[in-house]
Image (tube, rainbow, N blue to C red):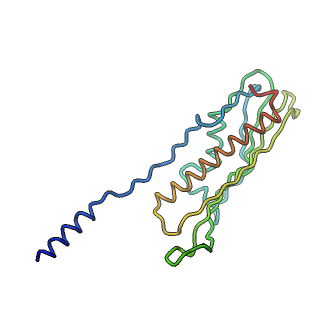
Amino acid sequence: MKKLIILFVSFCIFSCQPIEKIERIVFDNNQFSKFDILSNSIEITEIFEKKISNPYIGHTLEVDPSQRIINWVNDNFKAIGNENIFTVTILDASLTQNEIENIEAKNFDEKTNYKYELFYLIEFNLYDDSRNLVASTLVENSRSTTSGLFISIQEREKIIDDLVYQGLNDISNESKLLLIKYMGDFIL
């Protein structure tokens, strides 16, 4: 009887352990580079056609990758001046999920994993008031990560949010380099 009581108490103690809480990724565009463009306006065009079939999963997110780019441009690019037109064209902002074989799996590891791939392609153009192209650059970034097949929804969301955040950080850094290189005379 004592063993049964000890077993019951042990079960109660171990079953009352706290559940791991997964922290959400905070998308704060203020952490990225800011740009003051010598232009009268900033126009954002999204010509990327969002796909809603496998393996594309961007449409399943609360805020899809292309909207993250739009928010980043709206928060971090400022038009200063009264001539020129600055355009940002989102050519691609895709997020895919594919099953891949885990070739390094040990005895008890999962033999198959998910691979998430994020790809950004953005074109920056500066036109004069007559719509003649003054300067242009193309910024491209891709990033990927993996996870197990059998993870919680919260873990999956955190992995994808982290991937999108890191991709946005990469695109911000790459944009800074290329905008200074090709549009340095028009950036303050």
| Picture quarter with the N terminus | bottom left
Q: Residue at x 83, y 35 (%)?
A: 182
Q: Nearer the viewer, residue 25 or 50?
A: 25
Q: Is residue 185 left or right of 93 when viewed as pictured?
A: right
Vertical side of 81 occupied by 12: above or below: below
Question: Total marks drawn?
Answer: 0
User: Hey, which quadrant is residue 134 in on the image?
Assistant: top right
Vertical side of 69 occupied by 4: above or below: below
**Residue at far top of view:** 82
Vertical side of 71 occupied by 107: above or below: below
Q: Position of residue 176 (x, y in %)?
A: 73, 37
Vertical side of 188 occupied by 69: above or below: below
User: Hey, which quadrant is residue 168 in on the image?
Assistant: top right
Q: Nearer the viewer, residue 34 or 17?
A: 17
Q: Position of residue 3 (x, y in %)?
A: 15, 76
Q: Position of residue 123 (x, y in %)?
A: 78, 43
Q: Position of residue 169 (x, y in %)?
A: 64, 44
Q: Nearer the viewer, residue 85 or 141?
A: 141
Q: Residue at x 75, y 43 (%)?
A: 89
Q: Is residue 115 left or right of 1 when viewed as pictured?
A: right
Q: Residue at x 65, y 43 (%)?
A: 69
User: Hey, which quadrant is residue 57 in on the image?
Assistant: bottom right
Q: Is residue 127 left or right of 150 when viewed as pictured?
A: right
| Picture quarter with the C terminus | top right
**Residue at far left of view:** 1
